Amino acid sequence: MTMEASKSLPAFLALAVAAALMFLAPASAGWSQGSATFYGGSDASGTMGGACGYGNLYFTGYGKSTAALSVAMFNDGASCGQCYQISCDYQTNPQWCRQGTSVTITATNLCPANYALPSNNGGWCNPPRAHFDMAEPAWLQIGVYQGGYIPVLYQRVSCVKQGGVRFTVTGKNYFELVLVSNVGGSGSVQAMWAKSANTGQVAMSRNWGANWQCLAGLVGQAITFGVTTTGGQTIVFQNVVPASWSFGMSFISNLQFTY
């Protein structure tokens, strides 16, 4: 609509048109089309654990605003921790959408493929589909419960987290498994290294989900981690793990990614 045309409309109608254009904007402003279902119950208790390894999502700060990503989106765990803003595609399915609403979720799990069912009828998470199996409380912010399945518009957004990045160390000496959680900014980790007084920098590799492995003897030493997110921001967490650490312990830093 041109400026000249909008001036000829009554004021109330012009406002209505403007509001409609704002609602339609996501489809042409870098948003993508996908779909969504829900799982985990009304309290999201069934979403605990998962393929990213975050464990109890209540305790680790992810809460009820989470989702399992389809196979193509999960990217073998490289997408763990990423945040997405999702809205129901009201123009496609007004019956089961809550109009004008959106929710931001963190990716904490994998929605596995089901090749026994067609991709458009039950095999929602089959490649190459973009699908979110959302925690029920998050899904209900954009969809009507009886619908069960809705088309959505989504976009990747920056993660805003409370507190610092958290490191949980499990495994054994010369095979330390480090869960990196509560990552802000890009949310997902691209590269990581560890350093102690006796080792110098040791490159780490993704073991599974958000768990990174270090093949060095670190027991009895303070540990520094260098973490680079998929957004390219690097933070060095100096001696974030004290020398008195033991396996199974978690350590919260005072530093956080912001973009």
Image (cartoon, rainbow, N blue to C red):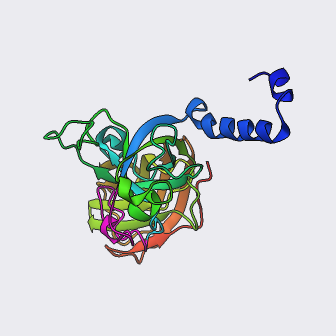
Of residues 130 and 256, the one drawn nearer to the viewer in this rendering? 130
Of residues 62 and 1, the one drawn nearer to the viewer in this rendering? 1
Of residues 184 and 6, the one drawn nearer to the viewer in this rendering? 6
The correct choice, above or below, for 164 with respect to 96 in the image is below
The correct choice, above or below, for 30 with respect to 145 in the image is above
Residue 248: image location, x then y, percent: 32, 74
**Does the magenta run of residues contain 100?**
no
The correct choice, above or below, for 17 with respect to 216 in the image is above
Residue 72: image location, x then y, percent: 32, 37
Q: Is residue 198 visible?
A: no
Q: Is residue 229 visible?
A: yes
What range is drawn magenta here? 38-59
Left or right, 202 with reference to 120: right
Q: Residue furthest front?
A: 10
Total of numbered circles in the picture?
0
Q: Residue furthest left?
A: 116
The residue under the point 39% across, 75% down is 245
Task: Locate the N terminus by quadrant.
Answer: top right
Of residues 115 and 214, the one drawn nearer to the viewer in this rendering? 115
The residue under the point 81% across, 28% down is 6
User: Where on the picture, by quarter, is residue 212?
Assistant: bottom left
State the predominant SS element of the stretch in magenta: loop
The residue under the point 78% across, 21% down is 2
Residue 190: image location, x then y, percent: 44, 43
Residue 137: image location, x then y, percent: 44, 65
User: Where on the picture, by quarter, is residue 164?
Assistant: bottom right
Left or right, 78 with reference to 31: left
**Does the magenta run of residues contain 41?**
yes
